[in-house]
Image (cartoon, rainbow, N blue to C red):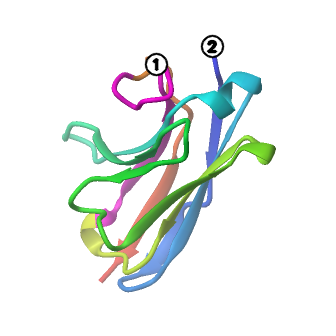
């Protein structure tokens, strides 16, 4: 089981930026896809962006052009740089480790998440 710890959330005005970090445990972390999901109470979790084990980034339409996902395997860390934030980006953000390098399936484990609030 790969454990993750998310950080970097906070309160920001619309149009502002935040950088979220996901630190994973174990050497296997660097070989797996890592995804950023967000959850608004009462709604299903949404996959916002993920980076494959090979470093290829993928984005949901809602994140395209505003968010950038990247990884630093030397630090066992995956980042989500969020620019041009909107009130509808308000959510709890979680990272999740894939079952392999592709991002096609995900382990069932979640971190504690980090809260992002965007004021209008």
Q: Secondary structure at mark 1?
A: loop
Q: Where in the figure is residue 55, as x and y percent of width and height?
A: 54, 47
As drawn, the residue found furthest toward the top would be: 1
Q: Residue at x 48, y 18 (%)?
A: 99
Which badge, 1 or 2, is on the more N-terminal residue? 2
Instruction: Please tell me whether residue 22 is drawn above or below residue 88 in the rendered image.
Output: above
As drawn, the residue found furthest toward the right would be: 74
Q: Quadrant of residue 46?
A: top left
Q: Where in the figure is residue 115, as x and y percent of width and height?
A: 48, 55
Res 1 label: 2
Residue 104 painted magenta: yes
- Which sits in the foreground, 113 or 51? 51
Q: Where in the figure is residue 116, as x and y percent of width and height?
A: 45, 61
Q: Residue at x 63, y 13 (%)?
A: 1
Instruction: Please tell me whether residue 113 is drawn above or below residue 62 in the rendered image.
Output: above
Q: How many marks?
A: 2
Q: Secondary structure at mark 2?
A: loop
- Quadrant location of the C terminus in the rendered image: bottom left
Q: On the rendered structure, is 111 left or right of 116? A: right
Classify mark 2: residues with Cα within 10 Å, few (<14), some (14-19) or many (20+): few
Q: Where in the figure is residue 85, as x and y percent of width and height?
A: 37, 76
Q: Quadrant of residue 89?
A: bottom left
- Which sits in the foreground, 82 or 13? 82
Instruction: Please tell me whether residue 106 is drawn above or below residue 50 in the rendered image.
Output: above
Q: On the rendered structure, is 91 left or right of 72? A: left
The region drawn magenta spans 89-105
Residue 52 painted magenta: no
Disc 1 designates what residue? 107
Distance from Cα at disc 1 to Cα at disc 2: 8 Å
């Amino acid at each position: 089981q790969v454990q993750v710890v998310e950080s970097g959330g906070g309160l920001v005005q619309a149009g502002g930026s935040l950088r979220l970090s996901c630190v994973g445990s174990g050497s296997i972390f660097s070989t797996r896809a890592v995804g950023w999901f967000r959850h608004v109470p009462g709604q299903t979790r949404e996959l916002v962006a993920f980076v494959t084990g090979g470093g290829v980034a993928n984005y949901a339409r809602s994140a395209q052009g505003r968010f950038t996902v990247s990884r630093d395997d030397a630090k066992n860390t995956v980042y989500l740089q969020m620019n041009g934030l909107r009130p509808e980006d308000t959510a709890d953000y979680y990272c999740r480790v894939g079952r392999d390098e592709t991002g096609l399936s995900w382990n069932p484990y979640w971190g504690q998440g980090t809260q992002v609030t965007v004021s209008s």
